[in-house]
């Protein structure tokens, strides 16, 4: 994407733009806009990580994006490895997605009534993910996981849920729990504002260890690939062990595939690892970049949801016509060939990072599971091993990550402003983009040696 100013001085005058946010060159300032945002939005952001607290400095403010590129309000372009945290897989502003959204908007943006598009998107998900015999839409991944907890408790008549340390399931009180010092402990509130009683029935276990599951447990909820602690693979037998443990006592196995769903392949992580959950939570890709969430699963479990059953779920914007139209446009273009190509590009990204680390001597190691790439910095793990759980992942060198992050940003590469997020490429990252990315990564890492 070329560096095109967000506006010019004459345009500013004609449009009556506020000079408070300008740099004096006829373009807005990232810093000034962020400072102004703080007076209207807590911390100046609507999702905490965007404030750059983990890496320091002040965030860039995005003006527009196209393909693999984002551009800030000052006109600087970056190769984007965030891709809306995986929600964008075809590339920013993909013509099929934007046209589908535009057409849907022309028909009306919300009805509070059923639509053909929500039916078609539910069918598209069921066709691709065999475990999802029924699908219910909502507005976010967080809403999907909170509904999964309520449904599992309602369907089983039990109260307890088991989660895994380092997995992230959105801003759901019952799932915002931290573990204690034991192998598997009753959860402690993981944030202020969550009372102890909200997580009193949440058990936190180490990732990659099959916990004891008894008949008080309604559900075991897991990220099948731990994509919020640097992309940690499930150990051989871990997911199958969870399936067997749940089957033994009649608990439900819930896969949180908000990140992995339609990222790792047509049928997500469950298809890749051949383990079938009872319920699956979706988000990100199924909206083509627009806000959406979904819960899918076995018919007899899903039909406990109202209006058929006694477990309440509703939402005025659930199945939103614009989001479902964008999601259909995205899924229609994600066939086996598309995933093969995205995986090739993820492999190239991993190679770029590995080569730059080797050339500079920086202690950067990468992990890759299909199309997901993670980074680990430092020498804390013996023998060059990669993390297998959250305690090991937390030994990454966050200060070094901050240096790498800002060096890359200065060279025009955008990563997530936190050391535990995945890196994302998609169909917008063609070979020309990856060639340019390689040059920028080499330049950036060489600058901090």
Image (tube, helix red, strand yellow):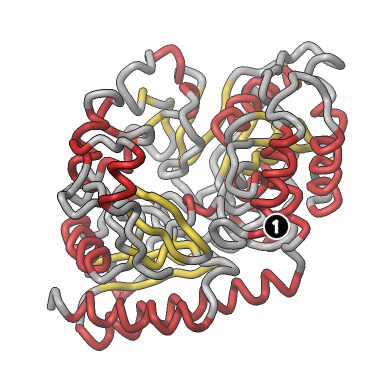
Residue located beneath label 1 in the image: 96
Q: Is residue 375 in sight in this rendering?
A: yes
**At which x and y percent is residue 54?**
23, 46
Q: Position of residue 134 (x, y in %)?
A: 83, 35
Residue located 25% across and 71% down the image: 411
How busy is the neighbourhood of tag 1: few (under 14 within 10 Å), some, or many (20 plus)?
Answer: some
Residue 386: horizontal and vertical position, in percent?
A: 38, 67
Q: Horizontal placement of 445 versus 269: left or right?
A: left
Circle 1 SS class: helix
On screen, 391 above or below 153?
A: below
- How far across and down, in percent of the image, does residue 206 sit? 44, 45
Q: Nearer the viewer, residue 393 or 95?
A: 95
**Relative to 407, is 82 on the left or the right?**
right
Q: Quadrant of the N terminus?
A: bottom left
State the residue in front, 331 or 37: 37
- The correct choice, above or below, for 434 with respect to 11 in the image is below
Which corner quadrant of the image does residue 106 belong to? top right
Q: Is residue 127 above or below residue 249?
A: below
Is 405 left or right of 305, judged from the image as shown?
left
Q: Nearer the viewer, residue 379 or 111?
A: 111
């Amino acid at each position: 994407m070329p560096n095109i100013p967000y506006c010019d001085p004459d345009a500013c005058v004609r449009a009556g733009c506020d000079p408070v946010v300008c740099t004096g060159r006829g373009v807005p300032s990232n810093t000034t806009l962020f400072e102004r945002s703080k007076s209207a939005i807590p911390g100046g952001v609507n999702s905490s990580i965007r404030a750059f607290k983990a890496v320091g400095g002040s965030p860039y403010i995005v003006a527009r994006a196209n393909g693999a590129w984002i551009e800030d309000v000052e006109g600087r372009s970056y190769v984007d490895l965030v891709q809306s945290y995986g929600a964008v897989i075809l590339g920013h502003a993909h013509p099929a997605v934007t046209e589908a959204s535009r057409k849907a908007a022309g028909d009306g943006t919300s009805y509070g009534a059923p639509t053909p598009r929500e039916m078609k998107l539910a069918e598209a998900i069921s066709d691709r993910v065999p475990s999802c015999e029924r699908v219910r839409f909502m507005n976010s991944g967080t809403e999907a996981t909170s509904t999964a907890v309520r449904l599992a408790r309602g369907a089983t008549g039990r109260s307890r849920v088991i989660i895994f340390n380092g997995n992230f399931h959105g801003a759901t009180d019952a799932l915002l729990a931290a573990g204690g010092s034991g192998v598997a402990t009753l959860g402690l509130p993981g944030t202020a504002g969550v009372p102890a009683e909200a997580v009193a029935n949440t058990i936190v276990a180490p990732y990659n260890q099959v916990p004891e599951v008894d008949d008080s447990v309604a559900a075991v909820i897991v990220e099948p690939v731990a994509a919020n602690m640097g992309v940690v693979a499930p150990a051989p037998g871990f997911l199958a062990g969870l399936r067997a443990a749940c089957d033994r006592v009649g608990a439900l196995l819930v896969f949180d595939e908000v990140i992995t769903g339609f990222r790792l392949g047509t049928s997500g992580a469950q298809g890749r690892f051949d383990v079938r959950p009872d319920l699956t939570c979706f988000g990100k890709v199924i909206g083509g970049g627009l806000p959406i969430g979904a819960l899918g699963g076995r018919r007899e479990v899903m039909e406990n949801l109202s209006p058929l059953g006694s477990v309440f779920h509703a939402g005025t914007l659930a199945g939103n016509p614009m989001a479902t139209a964008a999601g259909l446009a995205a899924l229609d273009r994600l066939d086996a060939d598309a995933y093969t190509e995205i995986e090739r590009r993820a492999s190239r990204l991993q190679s770029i990072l590995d080569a730059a680390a080797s050339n500079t001597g920086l202690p950067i190691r990468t992990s890759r599971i299909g199309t997901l790439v993670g980074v680990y910095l430092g020498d804390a793990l013996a023998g060059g091993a990669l993390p297998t759980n959250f305690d090991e992942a937390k030994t990454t060198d966050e200060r070094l990550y901050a240096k790498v992050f800002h060096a890359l940003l200065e060279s025009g590469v955008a990563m997530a402003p936190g050391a535990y997020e995945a890196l994302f490429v998609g169909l917008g990252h063609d070979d020309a983009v990856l060639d340019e990315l390689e040059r920028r990564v080499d330049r950036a890492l060489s600058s901090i040696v």
